[in-house]
Image: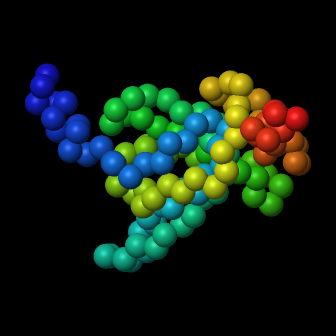
Amino acid sequence: MKKIQDVEKMYLKKDIPDFRPGDTVIVSVKVPEADDKFRIHDFEGVVIARRGSGINESFSVRKISFGEGVERVFPLHSPTIDKITLVKKSKAKRSKLYYLRERIGKQATKVETEHQQQQ
């Protein structure tokens, strides 16, 4: 069992920012183009869920694209993720923000921020 944990530690990424559900992030994903070429595709949206632990940890990001909601699930320690950039921190009262799926327009991306809470 110790050997499995040692191998898992080798593949864990160290440069992951501290983000939670409700935060807005930009996930830069490597997309294969030709044989040896990759391009970087940015996916910006609100983190709606985070699950798992260790090497099996993943998170879901939701964005509105041309009026349609788009969700993607990313393995956190995947080699296809180039970097994760934290754009905006927000305070959510839940750990899973699946209720944003039913929201339309500005309410679909509106999560209570720390500034709104203090007023």
Is 79 on the left-hand or right-hand side of 67? left
**Residue 35 vertical placement versus 79 (above, below):** below
Q: Determine if residue 58 is in view.
A: yes
Is 55 on the left-hand or right-hand side of 65? left
How many numbered dots are placed on residues in this image?
0
- Report the front residue among 20 and 45: 20
Q: Residue at x 43, y 43 (%)?
A: 75
Q: Residue at x 49, y 69 (%)?
A: 40
Q: Residue at x 59, y 57 (%)?
A: 26
Q: Residue at x 75, y 38 (%)?
A: 114
- Report the front residue among 100 and 66: 100
- Image coordinates for residue 111, horizontal then vertical, percent: 77, 38
**Residue 76 vertical placement versus 42 (above, below):** above
User: If the image is split into quadrants, where does the N terminus sit?
Assistant: top left
Is 64 on the left-hand or right-hand side of 53? right
- Image coordinates for residue 76, horizontal then vertical, percent: 43, 44
User: If the image is split into quadrants, where does the C terminus sit?
Assistant: top right
- Image coordinates for residue 3, horizontal then vertical, percent: 11, 30
Is 77 on the left-hand or right-hand side of 119? left
Q: Determine if residue 78 is in view.
A: no
Check the image and name the residue furthest to the front: 118
